Image (cartoon, grey):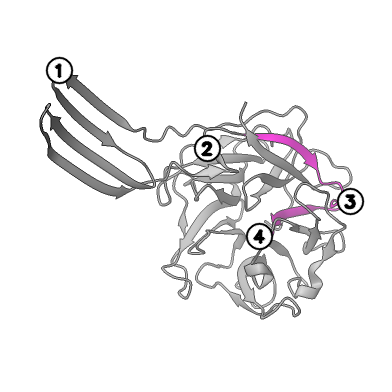
Amino acid sequence: MGRALAWVAASLLCACFSDPGVLPTGTTSAETGTTTASMTTTTTGATTTTTGTSSTTDDTATTLETTTTTTTTGGDEATICGLPLNAWAIGEVEILAELNSDSAEANPVLTEDELTLLFTSTRDSEQPDLYRASRPAIGEPFEPPVKLDALGLNSALRESRALLLDGGLTVYYGSERAGGLGNIDHWVATRPSLDVPFADFVNLTEINTADGEYDAFLSDDRLRLYYNLSVGSVSTIRVAERPSLGEPFAQPELVGGLESETSFDLSPWLVADERLLFFASRRTANIDIYVAQRAAVGLPFDAPAPVAALNSDANDSEVSLSPSGCEVFFNSERNTTPGKWNLYRATIVASP
């Protein structure tokens, strides 16, 4: 979201969340000379349930009944950074000192190759502009940031979270640029090559309003767009869906399990087949980072829980994860040196 929000971490706590799933079950009984077996097997995702009964004597083997049923449910094989959803934690948190300024940094998002970080900063103006910083390898420090004027993304007004897709040829991002419906809007643009700037920006009018639409997140198939809608002092997380890439998004709806018309929820980011939602929320005195889990896309989320290892006694917000799900980026007010809002990074690790 193109606004500052906060943070701090002194001693880090682990954040682990359970995912009971459905376990295979089976029963077998045996008698002398006769074996009777019955088994029901259930796996989630593309779920196959097999029920069979057989009778075997010393001389013959006869299958009396076999029934196979296939259904689709939420896939328990979903992972975050290759870890089961009940076996992850937050590792060490570090400040990205090489990227921060004496102004406000926000909206950190990694590109698909995980080597370039896009973010907004007010270091050169009162309005947040988009910057990028590259690194030679994952885990290495970032090089000095560069303003994204050459890409045609920065305007005279505010910019917000940017998603650079298709190797840098497509962008979805938030901007208050001229021609919108008011406040920050969602825009999309493409370009034929990396050698030219983006042009012909398209306003997603089926989603945008005169209020502020911030922090877009696209599903892997790009058929669902999650974001937060800010109306006055209220901010809610919404999702809009479309049947195919060539069609407009349908009317946005509140994300199930987070429904509230008086809340302050923002910066949605989903991983693990959209079953795990990270977001920021002012559910207490400060803005903190939360996580919520659900069984499958389309179902409501369970009650959110704060991610204690990322939160501080200041404001913490603007959370995103790397495409691999192994790195977490966010901004925080926990340490106002060098600036009021600074960028931080943490890793996803196996829970102890």
Q: Are marks 4 and 3 in contact (CB under 8 Å)?
A: no
Residue underneath mark 3:
102
Residue 138 appears in view: yes
Relative depth, front residue between 24 and 176: 24
Work out how far the residue at label 3 is from the one at label 1, CA to CA, in angstroms: 82 Å
Q: Earlier in the sequence, mark 3 or mark 1?
A: 1
Q: State the SS at label 3.
A: loop
The answer to which of marks 4 and 2 sits earlier in the sequence is 2
Give the quarter of the image for residue 81.
top right
Whether residue 183 is visible to the viewer of this picture, yes or no, is no
Q: Residue at x 76, y 44 (%)?
A: 344
- Upstream in the sequence, badge 4 or badge 3? 3
Q: Position of 43 compared to 121: left or right?
A: left
Can you give x and y, in whole percent of width and height, for residue 306 in the image?
60, 35
Of circles 3 and 1, the one toward us is 1
Q: Amino acid at mark 2?
A: Pro
Front-lying residue, 264 or 105 = 105
Q: Is residue 132 left or right of residue 301?
A: right
Q: Which residues are magenta?
A: 89-112
Residue 107 position (above or below residue 97): below
The residues tagged by marks 4 and 2 sit, at their Cα atoms, a distance apart of 23 Å
Q: Position of residue 131 (x, y in %)?
A: 79, 62
Residue 297, percent from left and from top:
43, 51
Residue 112 is tagged as 4
In the rendered image, which residue does mark 2 sit on?
84
Q: In front of the other: label 2 or label 1?
A: 1
In the figure, is residue 89 to the left or right of 124?
A: left
* Dot 3 amino acid type: Asp
Which residue is disc 1 drawn over? Answer: 32
The mark nearer the N terminus, 3 or 2, is: 2
* Picture quarter with the N terminus: bottom right
Cα distance between the residues tagged 4 and 3: 29 Å
